[in-house]
Amino acid sequence: MDSLTLISSIPNLPLFFSNFLLIYLISYFVLFRDWTPKLRPEASSCIISLFHGTPAVLLAFRAIFSDPARNFHSSNTPFQSLVLDYSIAYFLMDLCHYLIFYPTDVLFIGHHLATLFVFVTCRFVVLHGAYSILVLLILAEVTSFCQNIWTLAAARRSDLAFADKVYRFLSPPFYAVYTVVRGLAGPFFVYNMFMFYLGGAADNVIPRWVWVSWIFVVGMAISVSILWVTNNWVELYWERTRKLDRKIS
């Protein structure tokens, strides 16, 4: 058996998880070996998020538009299932990261568990509705690249002038796009998703308890996201105001 055949014979989920684990370990022990112990885990988490976010968006787009029968309750295609496996592997890896380094961070641990519940039930329980979940994945991860660069810059802005410049440069456009995606596009799609499921058209393939839990989890995630970006807008406003006051004085 050649190496290509061997790789293709490994189930997607453990293969993807192993890749994310390897990337995390390389980041922690090699890429960020000179960073402080406090920052190394967070930075390594950002790197695996970079390897997940943008690729997941591109894969999800392809998986959605390659299915001519796509709708809120269509059966999952093999490619859609592969994309779900990719995201499940990432969230499992990042959940391990939080459980090891930040076991008291209940908010993020709860977020990852809830997200995994949505992905796993869609992928392995009902086998339908991947269109809905992948659109939500796109909305959640389309800002991932910018957010991770912003997070890495924020981690080093106190001791690196370049990191501070990157942080200050990225903050306004990142917050603006994040606000539009999470504050407008996300709620609009979830509303349409909710109205479709409420009509009962999916009850024969997606049990009501499943789609209700999906709506609840996504609604809570969007609410927390809106609160987070609002706090960041307020912090940015006061930071700019203090800077202006210092210049005037």
Image (tube, helix red, strand yellow):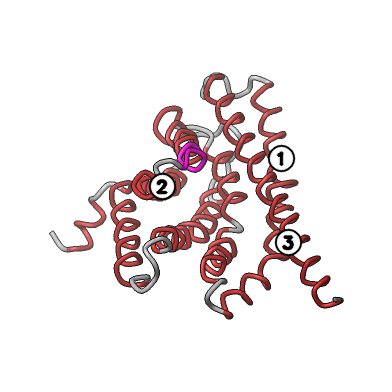
Which label was assigned to residue 102? Answer: 2
Q: Is residue 3 left or right of residue 162?
A: left
- Is residue 12 located in the magenta-colored stretch of the structure? no
Q: CA distance from mark 2 to mark 3?
A: 26 Å
Mark found first going from the N terminus, 2 or 3: 2
Which residue is label 3 attached to? Answer: 236
The residue most toward the right is: 248
Find disc 1 in the rendering and name its residue: 187
Q: State the image coordinates of residue 69 (x, y, percent, origin top left).
A: 57, 40
In the rendered image, the vertical position of residue 239 relative to residue 161, given as above or below: above
Which of 109/52 is in front?
109
Q: Residue at x 50, y 32 (%)?
A: 128
Q: Position of residue 90 (x, y in %)?
A: 41, 50
Q: Which residues are magenta?
A: 105-110
* The residue positioned farthest toward the front in the image shown: 249
**Residue 165, located in which quarter of the rendered image?**
bottom right
- Mark 1 and mark 3 lie on one chain; the one further toward the N terminus is 1
Q: Viewer-nearest of labels 1 and 3?
A: 3
Left or right: 22 as drawn, with respect to 156? left
| SS under mark 1 | helix
The residues tagged by marks 1 and 3 sit, at their Cα atoms, a distance apart of 24 Å
- Tell me which amino acid carries mark 3: Leu
Q: Is residue 182 above or below residue 145?
A: above
Residue 88 lies, in percent from the top left, at 41, 44
